[in-house]
Amino acid sequence: MQRIVLVSGVLIALVVAVVAVLSQPPAAPPITPPALPGTPPVVPPVASGPMPSTPPGPFPAAGAPAKPVPPGGNETPLSKFDPLAAFPHTTQFAVRGVLLGSDWVTKRNQPNGRFLFGYIPALQQPMTGDHDLKQAQSALAMAQAAKFSGDKQQVAIASQVILTLLASTKIADDSNSRVPVQSSLVCNRVGFAAVVALAIYELPNASDKLIEEAERLCAFLRAQIRADGSVHYTDGASDNAAQIDPAGMNEYPGFALQALAMSNRFRPADWKKEAVKKGVTHYLAAFRAKPHPLMAATITPAAAELYFQTKLSDMATATFEMNDWLCSVQIPPTDRRCPQWAGGFRNAANGQSADTPPATAETGLYVQSLACAYHLTRVTADLTREGKYGPALTGAVNFLVGLQFLETNTRHFENAFRANMLIGAFYLSPLDGNLRIDATACAITGLLRFLSSGAESRQ
């Protein structure tokens, strides 16, 4: 009898439990976070190990920020890459690099209207050495990234930083030009004015007032142009700029010519075309005498831009000559002395290629240069050089994106720290994991130029 009662009790308990379960409402389906349009399924992360010199898989890494694509009629360049899986792996890496990199730069914006200059992950502390020119390069990259993705927050940040940097200039007595107030010993005036102007021209839907300020900066640059086409980039009118700052010749004149070429696109003027033409011719001669990768990287965008505007054959000649040489100093995968640098570029000393690889904060500028040259081969139907620049550009992009902190190469850091401070940033070199805002900015600029060069569809 006791056994029958026990069995009956168990049966009653089971019935009650079943009824309770059936009476519960159905569970809500899991919520899936939005993803980049066309992004393929996330590949499970591999086991942790040393930082890879190449991207860890064929698809964008997990954690890539979702960027909504505006509806038809207001599409951004990003929408061209939907579905992303249809593009070559290098292009997928580049799109991921831009989105993660620009998200990292966005997070570095500070209340004072500037970006955090740099960070040392091993010490978990900011880097000293803030510099206005590098802030301007970051504003330029932010404006370009905002135009690519349509991100309104990035537009606002780029505008804020540009206005902050303009506060370091003043309108000259003639009221037609805007002059940087700091000495070139602190921040080169020519380079700073040129890059701030470029940032304004790249800003999506820049106001007429801002464009006018960029034109004032270009008026200052005009005053630095000499009769032979050279750009005087030191403060003293009688200075020998090449003696006072010899390294500056490889950087500041090129930025100035880029700004004038972009200015001519917005507000055409004969003096701008003539200044860029004579400037490119002058610095091509200087390049032939003492070639340097940074000179090629800064002069090329100006020469290519003027060619697209005017079809001047001299501009194509200069672009091709400098980038032929740039390809010759690219480190091939077969170089056993430094395999982790494959795709990067050697530095130059006294016009000769150096044996040791350089620091790579400027690698994005070299990518930009090759992308401009590749685009030009497509316009001029130079099939020989197209076949040469294509692989060189692919190798350079793969090297560059291999310097980005991702999920797979930051597992040895605490999760919140790596998510907030590391992922998306481009570190300085395969041997230097420190972060500087200009390294990520230059990477964004270079990758975006690659994504619009025609090489992004190259299989």
Image: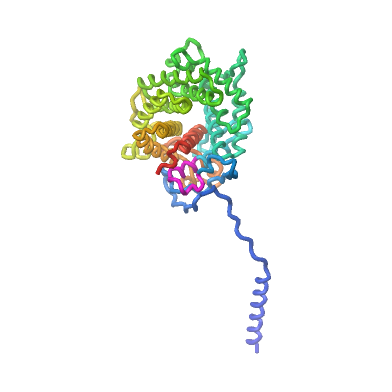
The N terminus lies in which quarter of the figure? bottom right
Instruction: Write the start and end of the magenta stretch as one range.
Output: 81-97
> Which secondary structure dominates the residues rendered in magenta?
helix
Q: In which quarter of the image is residue 246?
A: top left
The image shows residue 250, relative to residue 104, as above or below, that is above
What colour scheme was applied to this rendering of the protein? rainbow
Which residue lies at the image location 54% right of the left edge and 22% below the top edge?
268
Q: In which quarter of the image is residue 350?
A: top left
Q: Which of 13 and 142 is in front in this view?
A: 142
Q: Does the magenta stretch include residue 87?
A: yes
Q: Can residue 341 be seen in this view?
A: no
Count the labels in the image: 0
The image shows residue 2, relative to residue 415, as above or below, that is below
Q: Does the magenta stretch include residue 338?
A: no
Q: Residue furthest bottom?
A: 1
Query: Residue 125: image x %, image y %?
Result: 54, 36
Which residue lies at the image location 52% right of the left edge and 35% below the top edge?
119
Q: Can residue 207 be seen in this view?
A: yes
Q: Which residue lies furthest to the top in this view?
A: 238
The C terminus lies in which quarter of the figure? top left
Q: Nearer the viewer, residue 421 or 311?
A: 311
Query: Residue 285: image x %, image y %?
Result: 38, 19
In-image side of 26 versus 367 (left or right): right
Q: Nearer the viewer, residue 238 or 197?
A: 197
Query: Residue 90: image x %, image y %?
Result: 43, 43
In-image side of 70 versus 343 (left or right): right
Query: Residue 416: image x %, image y %?
Result: 56, 46
The image shows residue 55, relative to residue 31, as above or below, that is above
Which residue lies at the image location 36% right of the left edge and 35% below the top edge?
383
